Amino acid sequence: MKPIHVLYLSVLFLSLNLASQAQHLDPTETKLVQAVDSQQQQAIDFLRQLVEINSGTKNLEGVRTVGKTLMPHFEALGFKVRWVPMDQVQRAGTLVAEHPCPEGDGKCGKRVLLIGHMDTVFEKESPFQHFKMIDDHIASGPGTDDMKGGLVVMLTALQALKSAVVLDHADVKVVLSGDEEAAGHPLDIARRDMIEGAKNSDAGLEFEATARVNGVFYGSTARRGSITWRVEATGQTGHSSGVFGPEMGYGAIYELARILDTFRTQLPEQYLTYNVGLVLGGTTAQVNAQETGGDATGKPNIVAPSAIAIGDIRCISSEQVERVEKKMRDIVAGHVAKTDAKINFYEAYPAQSPNQENRALLKLLNQVNSSLGQPEMPELDPMKRGAGDSAFIAQYIPTLAGTGSSGSGDHSAAEKIDLSSIPINSKRAALLIYRLTKLPEGGKLSEQVR
């Protein structure tokens, strides 16, 4: 047991710390914080309910069930909610919830767009299916952190805003995709409602996981885009005794090996990664429809006439994409003897480039952290975050990626959530939205945040 005087000093320090925080919170903000604190058990219970619904991207009915579970919660907060089917792209659909300014356009400060996704990477056949408490603040389960925990953070923040009568004077839109983990194509249809929401908003928050490294929370102002590529090489075929000769040349596999190794040596630059995920080659080579495998045949004494490689590139900007794609095309075009090759690039996620406006939004979030007595959140290196939906809205409005829960092991059976991250990140989100509503609609955020 601690000595009495130590306990007294601890209580005194805590009281002084809370008093210091209160000096930085106005009465409305104090109500927001208290409202979040009052919802902690309800938040965990709702997270359990969402996680127990399998919503793997290809489980369309499961994703729709998550949507049906969420919709009454938004309606109870005064949102007008609709479900947008995505049959055209073979996905479940998109949930759209709108809370326009009750006082009329332009009278509720910044219009805020909140985005996220309802699907997970764990399909119905996955053995990882259930919510489980590990200890008093850690839970595991499919999508606990990516991103059903983020959905709970979003709703907890909105419920606090409603409780503190802030939502009644706010313009907030919510768009939740049903296919972030495996996007439907074409993307201009799959992300149509998200993009439309951004065009009619002033700031955006994405509720995927808030990055935390060694106990330090980070703010994400940028994330790299992802583009899939496919190289197909061809060559002469015949007895291996003629390989490298003037009639036979090098064959398709050597041509493909030249291309891939030249990618390795000539492409490196900051923020760029390029991966080879699948290679097939031989007398015959064919990739399956899902591009997750395929079939190849061949013999040691036959020069291979066919070879295929599939991979991706991840870039920080559209300018980098254009530059790297040109380099790759030039490399592919430098054939070894008696071979040919072509490369194709496929529609994928754009980049969310770092910019002054995104950093202004992070600055406003760090002002919130200061008011809460929390440490400043440094800017996350975009190399440490994958592609995501925030990039679709960041082309139009200042955007932060990753303002949801925090955990570990995403996309694996080791996925866990730190339940203590739900209240703190809910407070951050609620206060950030509130302070955005205090700023005038339109205008540059970088000129308004001091």
Image: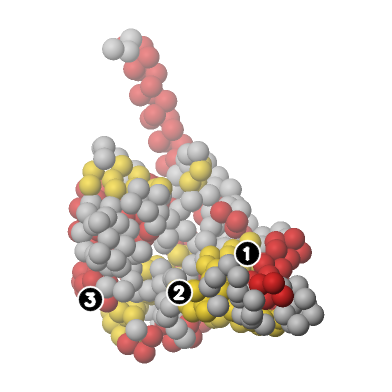
What's under tag 2, amino acid-wise?
Asp
Dot 3 alpha-carbon crowd within 10 angstroms: few under 14, some 14 to 19, many 20 or more: some
Q: Residue at x 26, y 48 (%)?
A: 40
How far apart are labels 3 and 2 at the CA level?
32 Å
What's under tag 3, amino acid-wise?
Glu
Q: Quadrant of the N terminus?
A: top left
Q: Are marks 3 and 1 in contact (CB under 8 Å)?
A: no
- Of all residues shown, which one is farthest toward the top? 3
Which residue bears the numbered disc 2? 295
What's under tag 1, amino acid-wise?
Tyr
Q: Which residue is drawn at 45% across and 65% down?
A: 206
Kindly state the secondary structure of the residue where label 3 is placed: helix
Of residues 104 and 197, the one drawn nearer to the viewer in this rendering: 197
Which residue bears the numbered disc 3? 61
Q: Quadrant of residue 304?
A: bottom right
Disc number for residue 70: none
